[in-house]
């Protein structure tokens, strides 16, 4: 695996380019004093190229092997090593860092550092930060094979392995710095990066979640051959269902477009059929993603026979309002349920989407401007704005609908995390 290349032009997992998988992730890279410390520069560089905000913290012994200057230059953040030194603010910066880190990676982790972590000793900056941080800690041990096999080291490693917060990236077999052969060589940089990426991205999984997604445009029959419809192709909803399924969610798709999928697809035609299907599934779902373009009106009556053009000179269709499915469900949704709506607008996108978000009691609304040519309805691409009920706004430039769906999956995973952290009264 070559993360540098794949992070720049990553198309395998998510199907689009220029994807920095670790964007918005803060990684605290702890480096302890072993010869493998020289590899920390490569690790820092790869993490940064994958989008992570990397902050290096060296033990005093690590400085004998590599310099803080190298790490500062590579990470583009000041490397830390002194526990007691001048500080810019009343609150030591490293405590803030320890609190905001998404992950602490210690590579290499020496026998000494592992022993300190197991015992809870914090006599330097790195061990203090680990103790002050709630983040997950991954350690990549690197030492002489005899040291690794020592009962004290084995015992200390087993203590860490049994602690929920810690993951050990096992050392490998090979020739170690002193010329001995055996297991003790730090895992390869690629292995470490892959483990870190998997750990950081794992929280964006949707496994254990039930998602109800709607797709397509409803058809409201006038007679047995004619209907009132719209231009929705169903591509966005299907992309959303596929992406969520790929993240491990238990997906049900309610769609006007019949597709073969590994998850259940309920095919419907009219707004009323969609309402019935969505309402019967809604209670058991954690999120409803209402991507479908549901007709606002339907013919008041449907002719049982094909209306002939000879029947009369003019044909007047009387329309009646369809139920606004998302609006009804927005009123009854539980606090632990998330609803994402869509707004396809031809004017005043931001204000219309904002109003809909509030009026329909949605958690998120995805708006797109249908007056922009070549994107949106029927296209494989779209450009959208995403408005959150907490006021956060973002706009995604033109990109494949699958990429938008992946983004929405991230957002959902983060919402679920926030819900899980909210105390139940
Ligand atoms: O108000 P408007 O129809 O533009 O709102 C769009 C959002 O509402 C979409 O998420 C759409 O799926 C949903 N909708 C609905 N029931 C309707 C009309 C729209 O759930 N009858």
Image (cartoon, rainbow, N blue to C red):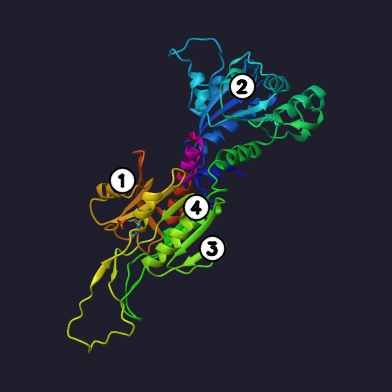
The label nearer to you, 4 versus 3, is: 4
Asked if residue 28 is positioned above or below residue 329 in the image, the reply reads: above
**C-alpha span from label 2 to label 3:** 55 Å
Disc on the earlier residue, 1 or 2: 2
- Given contact means CB atoms under 8 Å apart, are the residues at marks 4 and 3 in contact? no
Residue 371 appears left or right of 42 = left
Which residue is identified by label 3?
264
Disc 3 on helix, strand or loop? loop
Which residue is identified by label 4?
285
Crowd class of label 2 (few under 14; some 14 to 19; many from 20; radius 10 Å): many
Farthest left residue?
313
- Given contact means CB atoms under 8 Å apart, are the residues at marks 4 and 1 in contact? no
Residue 218 appears left or right of 13 = left
Instruction: Tell me the magenta residue range.
Output: 412-423
The label nearer to you, 2 versus 3, is: 3
**C-alpha span from label 4 to label 3:** 14 Å
Disc 2 on helix, strand or loop? loop
Residue 227 appears left or right of 98 = left
Q: Is residue 178 visible?
A: no
Disc on the earlier residue, 3 or 1: 3
Which residue is identified by label 2?
66
């Amino acid at each position: 695996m070559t993360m540098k290349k794949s992070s720049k032009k990553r198309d395998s997992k998510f199907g689009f380019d220029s994807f920095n998988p670790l964007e918005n992730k803060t990684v605290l890279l702890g480096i302890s004093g072993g010869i493998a410390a020289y590899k920390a520069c490569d690790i820092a560089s790869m993490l940064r190229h994958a989008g992570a905000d990397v902050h290096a913290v060296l033990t005093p012994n690590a400085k004998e092997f590599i310099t803080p200057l190298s790490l500062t230059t590579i990470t583009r953040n000041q490397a830390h090593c002194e526990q007691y030194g001048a500080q810019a603010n009343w609150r030591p910066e490293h405590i803030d860092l320890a609190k905001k880190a998404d992950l602490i990676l210690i590579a290499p982790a020496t026998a000494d550092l592992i022993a300190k972590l197991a015992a809870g000793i914090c006599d330097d900056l790195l061990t203090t930060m680990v103790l002050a941080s709630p983040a997950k800690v991954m350690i990549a041990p690197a030492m002489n094979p005899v040291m690794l096999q020592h009962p004290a080291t084995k015992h200390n490693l087993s203590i860490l392995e049994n602690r929920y917060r810690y993951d050990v990236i096992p050392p490998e077999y090979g020739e170690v710095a002193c010329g001995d052969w055996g297991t003790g060589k730090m895992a390869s940089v690629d292995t470490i990066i892959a483990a870190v990426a998997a750990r950081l991205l794992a929280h964006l999984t949707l496994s254990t979640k039930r998602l109800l997604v709607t797709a397509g445009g409803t058809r409201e029959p006038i007679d047995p051959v004619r209907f009132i419809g719209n231009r929705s192709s169903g591509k966005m909803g299907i992309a959303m269902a596929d992406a969520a399924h790929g993240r491990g969610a238990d997906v049900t798709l309610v769609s006007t477009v019949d597709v073969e999928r590994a998850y259940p697809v309920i095919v419907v035609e009219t707004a009323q059929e969609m309402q019935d299907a969505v309402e019967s599934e809604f209670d058991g779902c954690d999120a409803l993603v209402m991507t479908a373009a549901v007709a606002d009106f339907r013919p008041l009556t449907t002719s049982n026979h094909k209306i002939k053009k000879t029947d009369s000179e003019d044909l007047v269709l009387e329309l009646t309002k369809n139920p606004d499915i998302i609006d009804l469900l927005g009123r009854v949704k539980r606090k632990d349920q998330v609803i994402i709506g869509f707004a396809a607008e031809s004017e005043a996108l931001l204000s219309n989407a904002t109003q809909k978000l509030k009026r329909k009691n949605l958690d998120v609304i995805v708006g797109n401007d249908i007056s922009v040519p070549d994107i949106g309805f029927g296209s494989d691409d779209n450009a959208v704005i995403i408005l959150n009920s907490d006021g956060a706004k973002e706009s995604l430039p033109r990109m494949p609908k699958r990429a938008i769906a992946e983004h929405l999956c991230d957002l959902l995973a983060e919402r679920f995390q926030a819900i899980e952290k909210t105390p139940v009264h």
